[in-house]
């Protein structure tokens, strides 16, 4: 186990249509940042627009969608009926490629298994969220959430309401493991969103106390290895305020995050954001 800190001119009609679709998605997201848009569209409407566009701009493994003309179901776990109604109206008559988009509330395991995109509302709670993530990890579904810890638990896309705006972040490792690809436009926008949140001063503060993370027994049995990348908010007194997972397998990331929350850095005049990279290996 090792440890290291710090980290042609002619275009086909199909491509033109894809670029136009992605461009429209970017426009929606940019509009969502302006007060005028917030006054005319509710938080639910903006999140419904995100989900619709995630469905359009994601590419699943061929076997995940089954019949070429089968519906692409968006499942909603927990939350209220108002959001389900708004999402249903948003996708009414729309499709992702040749797949018509439908919406259902997830109440049973059968409901979950038929969904290719699952939106886990914050009210689902940690235990149910983890169960949904575990079930969809093998089913190949695109997992979207709205809880601060969603990506750390193994989710793929997280919608967060920050400073009057709805933003999103990605767990690229989880997407890769599911074989789900997002459009380059969406990935570029996610990169811009991640950069826009990095406003705190950065530095290479020295560690005073750092306990080694425990190698999860399940990860050991699965022979999981690899590097976890974290972003760590450090208070002025050197204690760790928060941890964000930038990359790595969820099992390994959880183990490292728990350890890092107990680390102590040297005091500094201001809060800083530090990078931690840790490689789990036999």
Image: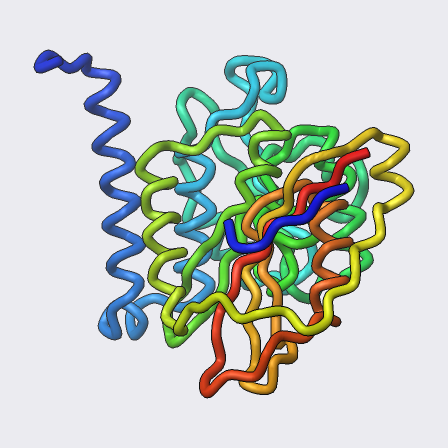
**Viewer-proximal residue among 1 and 273:** 1
At horizontal 27% and vertical 34% (from top left) the residue drawn is 21
Q: How many marks?
A: 0
At horizontal 53% and vertical 37% (from top left) the residue drawn is 102
Left/right of residue 239 with respect to residue 129 in the rendered view: left
Residue 264 position in % (x across, y down): 68, 75
Residue 245, quarter of the rendered image: bottom right
Q: Is any part of residue 75 visible from this angle? A: no
**Viewer-proximal residue among 119 and 217:** 217
Q: In the figure, 98 relative to 125: above or below?
A: above
Which residue of the protein is positioned furthest toward the left in this rendering?
9
At horizontal 26% and vertical 74% (from top left) the residue drawn is 35
Residue 117 position in % (x across, y down): 58, 39
**Viewer-proximal residue among 84 and 279:** 279
Residue 251 position in % (x across, y down): 76, 45
At horizontal 71% and vertical 70% (from top left) the residue drawn is 263
Residue 52, quarter of the rendered image: top left
**Viewer-proximal residue among 280 and 47:** 280
Q: Locate the N terminus and report the quarter of the image it occupies.
A: top right
């Amino acid at each position: 186990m090792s440890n290291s800190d710090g980290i042609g001119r002619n275009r086909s009609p199909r491509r033109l249509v894809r670029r136009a679709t992605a461009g429209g998605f970017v426009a929606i997201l940019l509009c969502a940042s302006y007060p005028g848009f917030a006054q005319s569209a509710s938080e639910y409407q903006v999140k419904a627009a995100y989900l619709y566009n995630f469905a359009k701009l994601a590419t699943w493994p061929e076997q995940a969608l089954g019949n070429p003309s089968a519906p692409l179901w968006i499942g909603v776990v927990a939350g209220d009926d108002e959001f389900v109604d708004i999402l249903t109206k948003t996708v009414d008559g729309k499709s992702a490629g040749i797949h018509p988009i439908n919406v259902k509330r997830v109440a049973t395991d059968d409901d979950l298994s038929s969904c290719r995109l699952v939106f886990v509302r914050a009210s689902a709670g940690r235990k149910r969220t983890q169960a949904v993530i575990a079930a969809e990890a093998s089913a190949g579904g695109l997992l979207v959430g709205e809880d601060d810890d969603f990506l750390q638990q193994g989710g793929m896309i997280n919608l967060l309401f920050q400073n009057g705006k709805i933003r999103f972040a990605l767990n690229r490792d989880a997407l890769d493991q599911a074989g789900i690809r997002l459009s380059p436009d969406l990935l570029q926008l996610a990169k811009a969103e991640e950069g826009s949140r990095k406003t705190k001063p950065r530095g290479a503060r020295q560690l005073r106390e750092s306990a080694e993370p425990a190698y999860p027994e399940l990860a050991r049995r699965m022979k999981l290895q690899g590097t976890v990348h974290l972003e760590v908010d450090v208070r002025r007194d050197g204690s760790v305020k928060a941890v964000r997972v930038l990359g790595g397998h969820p099992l390994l990331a959880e183990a490292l995050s728990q350890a890092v929350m107990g680390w102590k850095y040297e005091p500094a005049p201001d809060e800083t954001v530090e990078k931690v990279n840790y490689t789990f290996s036999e």
